[in-house]
Amino acid sequence: MLAGLLVSGALTLGAAQAQSSVNIGYSGPLSGGAAFYGKDVQTGLDMAIDEINKAGGITVGGRKVKLNLVSLDDKYLPNETATNVRRLLSQNNTPVIFVPHSGGIQTVQGFNQRDPSFLLVAYSSEPKILEAGNKLTFMLPPTYDLYLKPFASNSMKAYGKRLGLIGTTSAYGKAWTEAISAEWKRQGGTVLANNGVDYNTTVDYTAAVTKALAEKPDVLFIGGPSQPTALVVKAAREQGFKGGFMVMDQAKFEQMDQIVPTSMLEGAIGVMPLRDYRAPGAQRFTRAYQAIYKQVPTAEAALNYMGVYIVARAMELAGSVTDVDAIRAKIPQAAKELPPQRKLVNVSGVDERGHLEGQLIMGMYRSGRLQQVGR
């Protein structure tokens, strides 16, 4: 009997210890042309989880639980994302998985509501993610359709009506290209040939830029990960292009200006850097992030950092780290309860589709300075 009680006690203790941590999954590009982008997302996740754990973890059902990030490289390929996610579920029991690209997100949405179900935290501005009506998706950034009208109107007014296209050819890039082309036409502009290339594999952008400039565009639509986007700008300026750039929201000025001088970015319109946000926690986060990672934080790091804190609080409110439906149901309340020091952008809430409603700030380089532009 004593032996049986000892075994039972050991099993109970083991079960309690096993529940003292929860794995959070991440599948993103950690190698290839989009590696910097994927690692920016990962640093935001890491930083939030490290802070939470150093503070003692989260309190769920009266006990302390720590978070553990399990990251897998999907090379920006949706089929690899699906493989990684299934591995995270079967080997690591991850109730929450972060994915930072639209192709992977939309692939995973095809099965995340089935057994085993899990909460998909989506970092992409693709509107189709919300249109899917997936009940277990929590989407972080603003949708890119909000950028279309101001991007086109400001660029057309400043430079002219002929638009060249050199966007990345990922599923996300193709959707962006189609959308900005339609908006450009709606505003009376002319859309030239599509000379898009795969920013994940292309090294030399000279040929694509040469083809685009042969049609004498006034404005170029460009974008993908920040580093290759900057190389497209460099190639265009070196070939004598004097016009403007509409920069897809995936590319960030605060990273591009580390590769090309800001003089080359004159006339470029895109997302304002996090350093220019005035939300309560933005400046604190920027200083802390730079101290740890020795680089400027981007929206990728910032929004995923916030995403971890919202998910962690939702787990506390749900009283569970495994009941994904209960966790998802508490996401709106968790977002509203986000403390000021964790608000890196101004957040108004989470809508019924699971979309984080936050601040949208755009900027355009004019006379050597990045100036905010309105919608």
Image (spheres, rainbow, N blue to C red):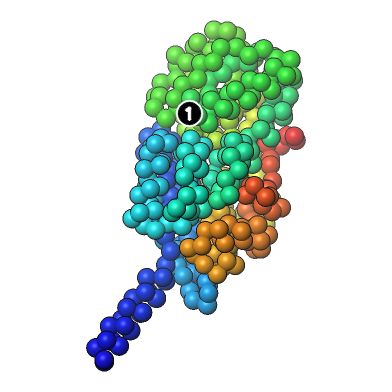
Please indicate, yes or no, whether residue 351 appears anywhere in the rendered image. yes
Quadrant of the image containing the C terminus: top right
Say if 147 sits above or below 296 in the image: above
**Residue 70: image location, x then y, percent:** 39, 54
At 33% from the left and 84% from the top, the residue drawn is: 9
At 36% from the left and 43% from the top, the residue drawn is: 83
Residue with the mark numbered 1: 170
Q: Secondary structure at mark 1?
A: loop
Tell whether 103 sits left or right of 343: left
Q: Amino acid at mark 1?
A: Ser
* Quadrant position of residue 363: top right
**Residue 20: image location, x then y, percent:** 42, 71
At 49% from the left and 64% from the top, the residue drawn is: 321
Please indicate, yes or no, whether residue 231 appears anywhere in the rendered image. no
**Residue 292: image location, x then y, percent:** 46, 55
Nearer to us in this view, 196 or 1: 1
Nearer to us in this view, 243 or 23: 23
Nearer to us in this view, 121 or 220: 121
Say if 372 sits above or below 140 in the image: above
**Residue 21: image location, x then y, percent:** 42, 67
Residue sticking out furthest to the left = 3
Say if 320 sits above or below 137 in the image: below
Say if 48 sits above or below 14 in the image: above
Tell whether 287 sits left or right of 337: left
Figure label count: 1
Residue sticking out furthest to the bottom = 2
Quadrant of the image containing the N terminus: bottom left
